[in-house]
Amino acid sequence: MKFLKPGDYAVLMLGALLTALLFAHVLTGGKGATLLIRAGGRVFLQTPLSADQIIRVPGPLGVSLVEIRAGRARVAQDPGPLQICVHQGWLSRAGQAALCLPNQVSIEVQGTHGKGYDSLNY
């Protein structure tokens, strides 16, 4: 194209890079600070992610084990048949969650700067 000069390409590339960085910053929640555990629709426990621990959460099918280690959390064991919440793996960013629906247990990472965005609240 004869209309664009080398400086124009540099400005376009810089704009694209800046847009990508801002997009990534806005759509990801900050680092998680606390973990909110719900059982049966009620808050079971809210605890900081800074303290390593294993928490036993009772549910209708049995006990789910929630592990907190090195500033992140996961459902280590669950009596549910599909193990979907266990397969979620480690959660560390604000707004991330794992739901053990058959056992009515959920965990959610909360941050100091609010939740990150996902496709549902975009």
Image (tube, rainbow, N blue to C red):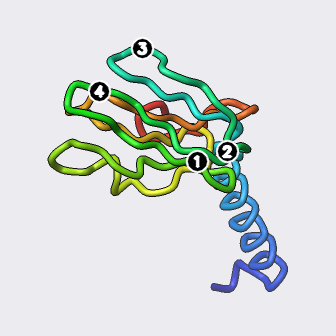
Which of label 1 and label 2 is nearer to you? 1
Q: Viewer-proximal residue, 118 or 81? A: 81
Q: Assign the N terminus to one quadrant of the image.
A: bottom right
Q: Which residue is mark 2?
A: 26
Which of label 4 and label 2 is nearer to you? 4
Could you tell which of marks 2 and 3 lies nearer the N-terminus? Answer: 2
Against 83, residue 32 (above or below) is above
Label 4 to label 2, Cα distance in Å? Answer: 35 Å
Name the residue type under label 3.
Answer: Arg
| Disc 2 crowd, CA 10 A, few/some/many (<14, 14-19, 20+) | few
Label 1 to label 4, Cα distance in Å? Answer: 19 Å
Q: Which residue is mark 3?
A: 42
Label 3: which secondary element: strand
Which residue lies at the image location 22% right of the left edge and 25% below the top edge? 60
Name the residue type under label 1.
Answer: Ile
Name the residue type under label 2.
Answer: Val
Label 2 to label 3, Cα distance in Å? Answer: 30 Å
Could you tell which of marks 4 and 2 lies nearer the N-terminus? Answer: 2
Query: CB atoms at circles 2 and 3 under 8 Å apart?
Result: no
Which of label 2 and label 3 is nearer to you? 3
Query: CB atoms at circles 1 and 4 under 8 Å apart?
Result: no
Left/right of residue 7 with respect to residue 79 in the rendered view: right
